Image (spheres, rainbow, N blue to C red):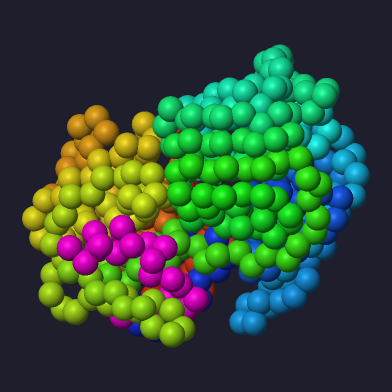
Amino acid sequence: MDKIRIRGGRVLRGAIPIGGAKNAALPLMVASLLTDQTLTLVNIPHLADITTLANLLGTLGVEIALDGHAPNGGHAGRALALTARKLAGTTAEYDLVRKMRASILVLGPILAREGRARVSLPGGCAIGARPVDLHLKGLEQLGASIELTGGYVEAKAPGGLTGARIVFPFVSVGATENLMMAATLAKGRTTLVNAAREPEVGDLARCLVAMGAGISGIDTDTLTIEGGKPLHGARHSILPDRIEMGTYAMAAAATGGDVELVGGRLELIQSAADALRGAGVTFEQGEKGVRVSRSNAALTGIDVMTEPYPGFPTDLQAQMMALLTTAQGASMMTETIFENRFMHVPELRRMGANINLHGGSAMVRGVPQLTGAPVMATDLRASVSLVIAGLVAKGDTTVARVYHLDRGYERLEEKLAACGAEIERLKDAA
Ligand code: UD1
C-alpha cells in the first residue's frame, strides 16, 4: 500500500485548486437513476469514492461516460454523463455497498422508479455504527413495505410511493437526500421537516429541479416536494468541495502560510472560518477564490463543537484538532455527530500532541512543536489530519493507508507540493 512522506517545517504559499464536492457528487450520480434520460455532471472530482459508486451504478444498468480533462493534471473525467435508460436490476450487492456507506442512497431512487429494491445494509464503519433507520422509516412513510433479510433491505411498493409528511427526529444528510430523491417520483406532496441544510443537499435539490422536479424550501430545514412527474435529463455543475477548502485552509494556517483556494466560496465554510478567525487566521473572498493566511503571530486555542450545517462540520474536526495541537493555550473540541470520531487522537499523541479525551470531547493543550513519526489512520478525514500535523512537525512523518486519502482528496500531495510542502508519495513496490 502507498504511503505519504512529509518533511515538516515548510510554510505553504501559493494557490490550490478546489475540486467539485465529493459529498455532492455522490448523491447527484445516484439521481441519474430517477430518469431514462442523460444526467451530465460537470466539475466531477477524480476520487476513489466516485469510481466505487460508478461501479455500483454500472451493475444497475447505468451507462456512464467520462468526458473532458482537468486543465493541469491530465485526469479524464471532468464531466460525467449518466444514463439509466432501463435499470438492469434492482439489487445493490454487498460487495459494492460495503466499500462505501453512501451506496445506501440508491435505495430510494430504485424503489421509486421500479416499485422494489434490494440493497445490502452498509454495516458499521470506523467512525461509528451509523444506522440507516431514518432512511427506512421515511420510505415506509412513503408507503413502502420493508424487510431486513440476509443483511439486505428488501423494499417493496408495487403501486408506487405516495407523498407524506416526514419529521426527522434529528438531522441526517443521507436520509434527507434519499427521501428527497424518492419523493420526486412519489404521487403527491412530500414534506421533509427537520431536513439537513448542508450545501450538498441544496445542490442535489437544484439538480432535481433542473431535471423537472418541483421542490421548494431549498436550503431550509423544510423541503416540500411535489412528486409524480417524470424527470428528464439535465446538465448540472457540482458546487466546490467545502471540506477540501477547509482542509487546505487549516494546512495553510498551521504552517503560518498564505494560500489562495482557487474556485472556493467563503460562505460555504463560514462556521469553520469564524472558528479559525478566533484562532488567529485571516480569510478574504477574492474574485478567483478564497485567500487564507496567518501572519507570524501564534495560533491561539479555541473551543469548537461539531453540528449540522450551518454549524462547524464534523468532517473538519480532525483537521482542526491537528491545527490546534500547536496553538497557544487549551482548546476543547466536542464531537456531536458521530460517537467514535477521535481515531486520530492516539496518532497525534504519537507525534507529541497533548490531547485528553472525555467522552465526546477532546481537551487539546497546545505544545510548542510536534515531532514526525510513522502514523496511520482509519478514515479519510483522520488521515488528512495527520498530513496537516506532518506539515508542521519537526522531521519526517510517514502516513500509511493512503487509500483513505484517495477516497476524498484529489492529487493531495501535488497540490501541497506546489505550495512548497516537502511531501511525496511512496509507491508500494508490491
Ligand atoms: C454525510 C456525509 C459525511 C458527513 C455526515 C455528517 C456524504 C456522502 N457523507 O454522511 O461525510 O460526515 O453527512 O455531516 O455526504 N444516523 C442515524 N440513522 C440514520 C441516518 C443517520 O442514526 O438513518 C446518524 C448517524 O449515525 C450520525 C448522524 O445520524 O450519527 C448523522 O449522519 P448523517 O447526516 O446521515 O451522515 P451521512 O449522510 O451518512
User: Residue visible at 57% across and 50% down?
Assistant: 216
User: Residue visible at 87% across and 35% down?
Assistant: 89
Q: From this viewpoint, is residue 132 visible?
A: no
- All told, the count of numbered labels is 0
Left or right: 192 as drawn, with respect to 142: left
Observer-nearest residue: 225 or 390?
A: 225
Corner quadrant of residue 386: bottom left
Observer-nearest residue: 393 or 211?
A: 211
Residue 263 belongs to the span the image colors magenta: yes
The range drawn in magenta is 255-278
x, y (%) of residue 187?
Answer: 74, 34
Q: Is residue 170 above or below residue 416?
A: above
Observer-nearest residue: 187 or 9?
A: 187
Residue 425 belongs to the span the image colors magenta: no
Corner quadrant of residue 136: top right
Left or right: 194 as drawn, with respect to 27: left
x, y (%) of residue 83?
Answer: 84, 55
User: Residue visible at 62% across and 35% down?
Assistant: 190
x, y (%) of residue 269?
Answer: 37, 62
Q: From this viewpoint, is residue 277 visible?
A: yes
Left or right: 202 as drawn, with respect to 197: right
Q: Is residue 360 above or below residue 62?
A: above
User: Residue visible at 13% across and 62% down?
Assistant: 300
x, y (%) of residue 382?
Answer: 40, 49
